[in-house]
Image: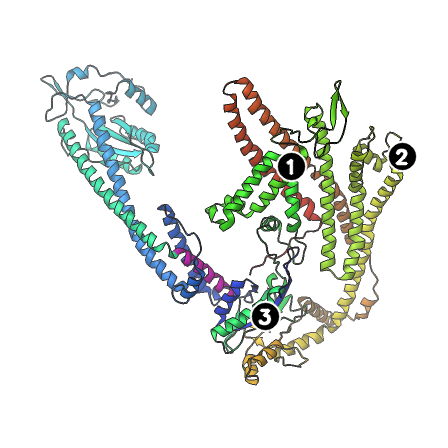
Amino acid sequence: MDKPLNIFRSETMLHRQFIIPRDSLSQHIKSLQRIQAVDFCNLNFDVRPTQLPFFGQINLCHQSLGRLKRIQNVMTKFGMDSINGSPDPEKEEIEDAETLSPMRIEEQLVSMERDLDEQLAREKELCEQQSDLQDMIDVLSIGQTILLESFAAGSVDSQVAVDPTYLKDLPQNSLSKDEPNDNLKEEEENRNADGNNLYYRTDVEGPSINQPPSVVSQGQVFLAVQFVAGIVSLGVLDIFHRLLMISLRGNVLFEYRLAPQRKDSPPKAVFLVFFSGPHSFLTINRLCLSYNATLFPFHEEGERSLAAIINHVQEMLGKAEEKLRMNDEVLSHSHHHIETILASFSPLLPTFSEALTSSLRLYSILNRFVVDSSSQMALGEGWVSERMISVVEDTLAQTAKTAADTTVPFVTPLRMNETSKKARILENGTIIPLPDELTTPPTLIRTNAFTAAPQKLINSFGTPTYKEINPALSALVTFPFLFAIMFGDVGHGAIVLLVGVLCCVLGRKGEGWTGGNDILRYFHIGRILLVLMGAMSIFTGLLYNEFFSISLPMFKSGWKVEAGKMRKVGTYVFGVDSIWRQCDNSLLFLNSLKMKMSILIAVLHMSLGLVFSLLNSIHTSRPIDALKFTFFTFLPKLTLFLSLFGYLSFLIVFKWLDASTHKPMLISVMIDMFLSPTKKMSADDRMFKGQETIQLVLVGLALFSIVWMVVPNFVMLCRQACRAQKEEGKKTERTSAEQERSVQQRKKPKYLTKGTDTETVSLLSGQSGRLSVAGSINSLSSEFGEEEKQKERYGTLTPTSLATSTTEAEEGKAGGEGEGDGDERSGREWEEREPAFDSGLFVHLVIDTIEYVLGCVSNTASYLRLWALSLAHSQLSEVFFDYLSILVARKVPVFGSVIGMPALIGATAAVLCGMEGLSAFLHCLRLHWVEFMNKFYVGEGREWGG
């Protein structure tokens, strides 16, 4: 029968050695992965990753996962669902041996990726053609508009003709000779002033195109300029225009219009450039290449007739539109074909993803085993939960029957001395320190929906050390309560509670509702915590008597107003009396209440942390060490803390219960207690009889506790140091004999047999210091034919250390050198040494004591954030309510409520519940990490990797 689940501490872990047949190793690892009961250790930690046996398979899995991720991105781009859900476990089990091997998956992914790349390349080419055609249509349509707007159509001849009546309307002196034309804004203004102004003044000798070069004949003027049309990005239009004017020294006409904005395309502009001469065309072409501007054929070479140009443009425009229509059809078919490929392959992607991930985990574990080629057995080590050890053994036995193994796998405990727990020593004497996974048990704390969120918050600070108290269990209660102290409001707590309930309803079938969003995933993990936080906030809201900053008269008031004065007539049933909201000193009363309540909570919470430190010591230390910790560490710390702040808490409660009208200020009482402990108190300052004596005793206890924490611990540590030196001297005398015996054991390996007293094992080839199964299984199998006898004999096969510890080896070398130098000191001298005064150790203890005393003060003051944030939340809620609902309704009588209520709802949701809730959450997290957990928590554990 399994032991009950323990969430207060890590489960008890057992270090076990696994000896499994090589042929069925993968099947056994898969079966152990399903029950998640073994955290395997890496025995090949000193081997390069490229030399591991399954390095190629791991790379293949990573490569296939990369291909899978790329296919997912393509599916997302085409608006299809990515990998969701999980494959059918039974189907995966049937297809695993044939179709779901990493090699087969890689072949199918490569084939699909090849087809997909061909289609995507074709689609990219079609999209580029479509973009070019759309640019050409824009240039042709907008270009002819610019041309028609620029030239007034007169008589249509074989050359471009302009009516002389049109010429007289052109501004001949639009630009002075000395004015540079390098500003698009001025150009745009000139164009707006006169849309037909195309001509720019030139400073060179010869014909000027500021006034069109012309031949006047029979009332007509013939233009002799060329032009090109193109499209350029709007971001470089300005610099393109400036360089064009500079390169051609102003002998150019430039007009542009914005092109229609298209999806997934930067804004562009269509331009026309009027110029003269072939040299100018070459310059324009080079500038277009430099700024990725595209030129399109606007008219045939040598064509000058405006009518012919327009007709040619119309013809080209019709052809371009026809090509664009055909391109759209082909692109639609290509897009549909890609969607068909993805849709046909989509059902396989979840299965492939799960299979590749499982194979990657499998090969990673297989690389942690050491395989003996002679015996065809694999050796591994791992940590197993004590409550799951029987399940592991049964799983291995069942898998062995399924795989028809001739040799039954077995699990043996590791019997290693302190030496083999720290280092591995090879045959050549090389010392290799063992990694933490081989020496330190992992921390396994199983969680459920209730404990998952607090456990993640604690693990964010640090994984609990093995067998250390897990603060997540207490945080399940204290975290929502401290949050509620700062967030106390019935209305706001109800909103948080509804959000938590909604997340619980949506999360009944898993976290699929999050859609992969990280923020929603956090809400899913902490859904139970949200419910508790909301419920606690409602409770504290009732205690504060606040509902969206409104005080509700739930019970009969304990005060009565008579003649402008308050008279106490009874006691309010629960919480703060609603009549306090009507008083002028309500803020002063609530501040005093919340501040004192914060101190009480601080004392209780930190006292719990000190109790946890005692429980840790009792559970993880020897009885004598736990007894020392209790009397020389825990009791003085608790006495000092309670002498200061425990007494302050007592005064707070006493002052609440005292019916007298005169009550001295507590801060004055505490100051006088330490500054003037022997001063006689007056009747007005005395709160109870015998107060001076009690305070004097508490001050004496506080001072005595400081000495109590330093002196006994210093004496014990000095004695331990002296005892360690004596043991070191004794070990030095035995170093030579132990090294010689260790060398002999390495040279003559043997196997343990039943009843053997000598603990010896064989060395693995290339893996000295670890158990080898070469020949052992064969000899044992021949001696015992039956499976039951095999199990009995395998259970006695236990490894032992073949090496001395690193410390002993170093000491032996040091001792040898000392003898060679003529040092005749005897190990007996260590036994005569008395404890010496260690000034460094004493200073260290004094610093720790001072740090604890100051920490008690600072940590208690840190809990005043409960009061500060509660006050800020209450006042901010009241301001929003007064200004957004009442004041707006007064200022705007008719539509005040229509305007104010939505604003109040938005401010409540965004500021009070969103920002204030996040602030309270972070401050609550800090109180747990810093003020509470530093009393007992180490957090240096290794997370379970099974």
| Mark 2 vs 1, N-terminal side | 1
Q: Position of residue 288 (x, y in %)?
A: 28, 36
Q: Name the residue under label 2.
A: 679
Is the stretch drawn in magenta largely helix, strand or loop? helix
Question: In the image shown, does 222 or 362 lie closer to the viewer?
Answer: 362
Whether residue 33 is situated above or below residue 228 in the rendered picture: below
Q: Which quadrant would residue 811 be assigned to in this image?
A: bottom right
Q: Name the residue under label 3.
A: 17
Residue 707 visible: yes
Looking at the rendered structure, the kind of residue marked 3 is Gln
In the image, taking residue 551 as reference, residue 187 lies left or right, namely left
Quadrant placement of the C terminus: bottom right
Residue 299 visible: no
The mark closer to the camera, 1 or 3, is: 1
Badge 3 vs badge 2, beta-carbon distance below 8 Å = no
| Mark 3 vs 2, N-terminal side | 3
Q: Which residue lies furthest to the left in this view?
A: 218
* Mark 1 neighbour class, 10 Å CA radius: few under 14, some 14 to 19, many 20 or more: many
In the image, taking residue 336 as reference, residue 944 lies left or right, namely right
Whether residue 262 is situated above or below residue 388 in the rendered picture: above
Q: Mark 1 points at which residue?
A: 486
Start and end of the magenta stretch? 349-366
| Mark 1 vs 3, N-terminal side | 3
Question: In the image shown, does 280 or 804 lie closer to the viewer?
Answer: 804
Q: Is residue 355 magenta?
A: yes
